[in-house]
């Protein structure tokens, strides 16, 4: 009965995920099931209640889930104010719950956006969907990291390409652009 997150980072089953801790706390295992079953109404309810899991919003958690792209496609336009919503807590507890392999300086950082989390842990389609729906790649975490910086560290050429295209455009338009 593992949590239905199939990305390697979502491999740990944690029984505490089955317990709601607060009225607006996302029950993680149930949320994973909602994603797998494409239960749009239940997910809309979580969005309406501004539910979070350990300080991380519905779109943030969906952005990291292997099959969460449909959630972003379905709700980013309907809830544009949530596309760049920032996490309120450090990444450490979420990383521990989901067995995320993250550097210590990232673990104690906060103010992550759905785009940053998709870049670090999600599928390329989620990164693309967020960018197409107005996610701002230049937003910074508390320590000054951006989605583009995280993309440069991710071993995924398609994710890197979503950020390099702007540079190619800049070079073509301005010649050699040294600002970026």
Image (cartoon, rainbow, N blue to C red):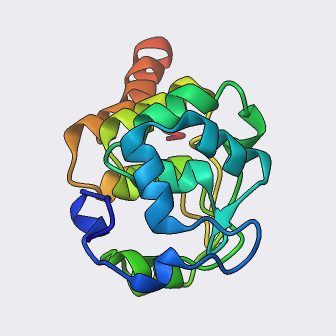
Residue sticking out furthest to the top? 173
Residue 82 in percent (x, y) is at 71, 43
Residue positioned 31% across, 48% down in the render: 66
Residue positioned 27% across, 70% down in the render: 2
Q: In which quarter of the image is residue 135?
A: top right
Is residue 98 visible in the rendered structure shown here? yes
Q: In which quarter of the image is residue 137?
A: top right
Residue toward you, 60 or 84? 60
Q: How many labels does the image show?
A: 0
Is residue 163 visible in the rendered structure shown here? no
In the rendered image, the quadrant that contains the N terminus is bottom left
Does 37 sit above or below residue 76?
below
* 126 relative position to 174: left or right: left
Residue toward you, 144 or 68? 68
Residue 170 in percent (x, y) is at 47, 22
Residue positioned 76% across, 54% down in the render: 50
* 164 relative position to 40: left or right: left
Q: Quadrant of residue 60?
A: bottom right
Residue 124 in percent (x, y) is at 32, 38
Residue toward you, 96 or 170? 96
Does 149 sit above or below residue 41?
below
Residue positioned 44% across, 36% down in the render: 38
* 145 relative position to 89: left or right: left
Residue 29 in percent (x, y) is at 44, 66
């Amino acid at each position: 009965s593992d949590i239905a997150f199939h990305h390697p980072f979502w491999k740990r089953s944690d029984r505490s995920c089955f317990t709601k801790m607060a009225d607006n706390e996302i029950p993680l295992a149930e949320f994973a099931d909602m994603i797998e079953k494409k239960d749009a109404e239940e997910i809309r309810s979580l969005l309406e209640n501004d539910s979070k899991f350990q300080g991380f919003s519905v779109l943030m958690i969906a952005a990291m889930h292997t099959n969460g792209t449909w959630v972003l496609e379905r709700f980013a336009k309907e809830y544009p104010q949530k596309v760049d919503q920032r996490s309120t807590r450090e990444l450490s507890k979420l990383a521990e719950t989901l067995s995320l392999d993250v550097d210590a300086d990232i673990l104690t950082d906060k103010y992550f956006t759905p785009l940053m989390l998709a870049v670090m842990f999600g599928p390329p389609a989620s990164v693309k969907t967020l960018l197409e729906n107005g996610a701002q790649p230049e937003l910074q975490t508390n320590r000054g990291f951006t989605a583009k910086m995280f993309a440069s560290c991710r071993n995924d050429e398609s994710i890197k390409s979503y950020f390099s295209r702007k540079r190619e455009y800049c070079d073509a338009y301005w010649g050699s652009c040294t600002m970026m």
